[in-house]
Image (spheres, rainbow, N blue to C red):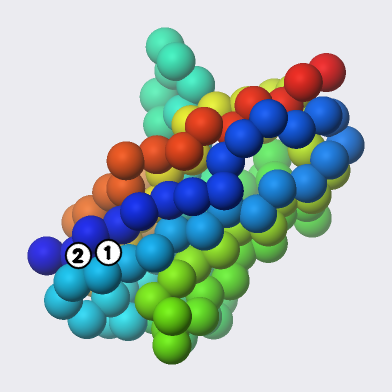
Amino acid sequence: QVQLVESGGGLVQAGGALTLACAASGRTPGDYAMGWFRQVSGKEREFVASVNENGGFPYYAHSVKGRFTISRDNAKNTVYLQMNSLKFDDTAVYYCAATRGGGGALVAGRADYWGQGTQVTVSS
């Protein structure tokens, strides 16, 4: 079992920045690829970004590429999502996810574990 706890969400003006963090605990979180998803009420959850077990091969959804940066610190069992140049359309609940299936599984929307989510609201 791996437990994921997100933090760092909040209210920010368009053009601003936020950094989300996801603290992982439990069974060897360093063995898992990790990523971020987001969901707007009434819509399907969508992939945002992923990174492999060693912090390599970051991959981004087209809508956030160039604005968001995913990273991980395995010494702290934490993955981060630095979000810059935020837009109103980035408003969503952001979820952390982990999988043994590699980054490709996350891109396909599959994960073994999910966090509880953190709200990000961007005011226009």
Residue 39, image x, y percentages: 46, 29
The answer to which of marks 2 and 1 sits earlier in the sequence is 2
Residue type pointed to by label 2: Val
The residue that appears at 50% across and 80% down in the rendered structure is 73
Residue type pointed to by label 1: Thr
* Label 2 vs label 1, nearer the camera: 2
Quadrant of the snapshot with the N terminus:
bottom left
Q: Is residue 30 visible?
A: yes
Q: Which residue is outermost to the left?
A: 1
State the separation of the CA atoms marked 2 and 1: 10 Å
Q: Mark 1 — residue?
A: 99
The residue that appears at 43% across and 51% down in the rendered structure is 6
Q: Mark 2 — residue?
A: 2
Dividing the picture into quarters, in which one does residue 27 lie? bottom left
The residue that appears at 70% across and 48% down in the rendered structure is 18
> Tag 1, which secondary structure?
strand
